[in-house]
Amino acid sequence: THPWPRWQSERSTDRRVLLSAATAHVIVTISGRPGSGKSAVAIRVAEALGLRHVSAGDFMREMAEERSMSILELSRSAEERAEIDREIDARTVRLGEQHDDFVMDARLGWHFLPNSIKVFLEVRPEVAAMRIYEAQRGSERENVDLESTKQAIESRTSSEVKRYRDYYGIDYGDHAHYDLVVDTSELSIAGVVREVVDHIRQVESGKPGTVG
């Protein structure tokens, strides 16, 4: 298995191997379970393709810090305050209307950017807990040990699933929504990025007027 430190150390290798995949005028949305690596993968896929990286997760963390809350606390608050999700949704839609050259990691990016190439990252719960615990993010202060991290992930996932079902009538974990699903549990960051970039290249090469 590959916890966060291992993944983070492979960044320069990814750039050397995958930079030749550069393309433009494509939107890629990457969703996934907590701890699946969607942010890390999205950053490196954007680098490999020469695109911008945008993260709804960063926006959530900023909102949590502004309110002196943890991510879990903000997620629970969002169950009662629809404006939190609406703010993220509006930013996502606006971005898609104004640009067509970015990779976004967001749980519901695929829903609000329907013309994107949609990727979902799976991960086993124990691997997710190890990665998140090792990351030691300040906005996730309830992660004091591995068991607490597992419980926080379960609570956060339940909160998100309920919220998205109540607000939009959708289950973001349903693989039918996506063009590509990758289980990252036993893969290195380079392996995941390679699968995603290869898929994007195949899609792009199949478009009319495109030379593969």
Image (spheres, rainbow, N blue to C red):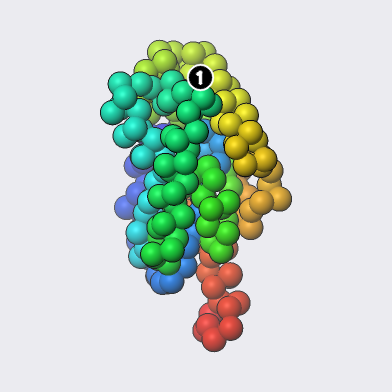
Circle 1 sits in a helix, a strand or a loop, which is it? helix
Q: Residue at x 58, y 22 (%)?
A: 154
- Crowd band around label 1 with a 10 angstrom C-alpha radius: few (<14), some (14–19), many (20+): some
Residue positioned 46% across, 23% down in the render? 77
Would you identify the image quadrant in which residue 179 lies? bottom right
- The residue at 57%/56% (across/down) is 118
Q: Is residue 187 visible?
A: no
Q: Say if 38 sits above or below 35 in the image.
A: below
Depth check, front residue: 153 or 97: 97
Q: How far from the left and from the top, in percent, is residue 76?
A: 50, 22
- Most extreme residue toward the bottom is 209
Residue at 37% across / 18% down in the picture? 141
Q: Relative to residue 81, is residue 175 drawn left or right?
A: right
Q: Position of residue 165 (x, y in %)?
A: 65, 35
Furthest residue toward right? 176
The amino acid type of the residue labelled 1 equals: Ala
In the drawing, does residue 197 fall left or right of residue 165? left
Please count the marks in the image.
1
Q: In the visual, does 192 lie left or right of 7?
A: right
Residue 111 in the image: above or below residue 18: above
Residue 155 versus residue 202 in the image, above or below: above
Q: Position of residue 69 (x, y in %)?
A: 35, 21
Q: Position of residue 15 (x, y in %)?
A: 35, 58
Say which residue label 1 marks: 152
Q: Is residue 8 above or below residue 49?
A: above
Q: Camera-side residue: 53 or 201? A: 53
Of 1 and 64, the residue lying toward us: 64
Residue 212 visible? The answer is yes
